Image (tube, coloured by chain):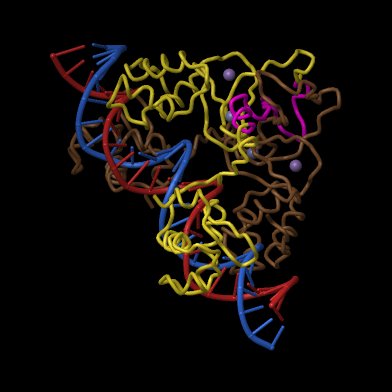
Chain colours: A brown, B yellow, C red, D blue
Amino acid sequence: MKHTLRMTHQREIILAELRKSTSHPTADELYERIRKKLPRISLATVYRNLEILFEAGVISKVEISGRQKRFDYDLEEHDHIYCVKCHRVDNINLPKTQKIVVRQKEQKGYRISGCRIEFYGICPDCRKKQKKELEGDNKMGCSSCELSDKQKEVLEALAKSNDPCGSKDIASVTSLEPKQISCQITALKKKGYVASPVRCKYEITEEGKKALD
Amino acid sequence: MKHTLRMTHQREIILAELRKSTSHPTADELYERIRKKLPRISLATVYRNLEILFEAGVISKVEISGRQKRFDYDLEEHDHIYCVKCHRVDNINLPKTQKIVVRQKEQKGYRISGCRIEFYGICPDCRKKQKKELEGDNKMGCSSCELSDKQKEVLEALAKSNDPCGSKDIASVTSLEPKQISCQITALKKKGYVASPVRCKYEITEEGKKALD
DNA sequence: ATGTACATAGTAATTATTATCAAGTCAAGA
DNA sequence: TCTTGACTTGATAATAATTACTATGTACAT
Ligand SMILES: [Mn+2]
Ligand SMILES: [Mn+2]
Ligand SMILES: [Zn+2]
Ligand SMILES: [Zn+2]
């Protein structure tokens, strides 16, 4: 079927960039790096070539559970560990005594062709961050995304009040119907912009004030 | 944060359906089954609850590399094997001698929290299919997807001719420019609808004729 | 009984990847 | 040298899986 695998400029650069990396980059991480040298390259070209190079046995693929595919210049069989927080992937060395020998070639009627071992945990960087958060008691919402118009309205209402408010208080100073308030409050709490000092009373957090600027 | 986990009807049904399954179903597989009992349930509800039940430690998740998440009612720690052809997932029993002991709690600064072992291979069903294909010498293109308008035009042109045609011949009886022909031919060959008996001459295959109906 | 927190259905948005296609490049052969 | 076709690319559309949003609905503690 395929006779020749041309070594195009794009392909060379992709391969070179992967060789330089020790971080098991994803297709789009590589794309961002390569763009600096080949500003006109397409993301599809990066995906396409990584797949072709993998099929040709030139590079290897690291399929870490249920997320982006990562690529590895290293063809030697080895295992990986990834961070459940930031999804970074590193090599890991298993002592020989722990290596699994796939002696059984069949089980449950399967013809077994391989085995993947992956460890997971929290990487050094994320451990540091965790410690800081604990010290600072800074529970900074994970997703500090943009506010919707309604969320903004509720948050502004809370900002104006000096005491914790119930949802009726909020309804009276906004254009929103009482029914809709709790939805918005829930979303705002998730983002860490609103806290509930006592049941059914809400107040704006420092984070929330910052978000309004 | 979360005080109560309500047991709604939807949640009950989802849990019951998962308990019945031994197949590590995906969210949408469960959705299809549950629809029969709760026709108004939303796919988002299934996703949401599977995630909530997993977070609550009631069920477990099987994240097989780079594909759909699957769920498991079985909370015991055990390993899996999956089919690279049809993506089916089964439990696998490792002899104790092969179990990895995560004795080292740290490596490369990681705080290790676990390890996943997954085998892969070809399941009994797919092995049978493979054999049949080999016998019948039926190389049926893998992706027998729909034809684009241009592909259809080229294929119809080939169908009318009794002898193999070059791309000029095709261009003369279609609305397509000569340049575009080769692209379409390539795609059609991939699908197994066109064959090249001699260099630069093409003819329609039996598969191709079927595809035109 | 009521008010609040939690849930749901329906839908939009997002993320990661693959497919399509016109146009470009290249190398082998007439 | 000219043609031809295989291979490749960039741009963009399409797909697949999952998550986010929001109005509305419901369970449950008081
Ligand atoms: Mn590696
Ligand atoms: Mn299982
Ligand atoms: Zn990390
Ligand atoms: Zn299979």
Note whether A106 is above or below A8 in the view shown.
Answer: above
Estimate the x, y position of residue A212 in percent, counting from the top left.
37, 49
Is residue A191 visible to us here?
yes
Estimate the x, y position of residue A137 in percent, counting from the top left.
53, 32
Q: In the figure, residue B121 lies in which quadrant?
A: top right
Q: In the figure, residue A42 lies in which quadrant?
A: bottom right
**Quadrant of ligand 2 in image:** top right
Could you tell me which residue is drawn at 75 percent across and 21 percent down?
B102
Could you tell me which residue is drawn at 81 percent across and 33 percent down?
A93
In the visual, does A117 lie left or right of B21?
Answer: right
Estimate the x, y position of residue B171 in percent, counting from the top left.
47, 72
In the visual, does B108 lie left or right of B24?
Answer: right
Note whether D24 is above or below B157 in the view shown.
Answer: above
Estimate the x, y position of residue A202 in percent, counting from the top left.
32, 31
Segment tinted magenta in the rendering: B102-131
Q: Nearer the viewer, residue B38 or A26?
A: B38
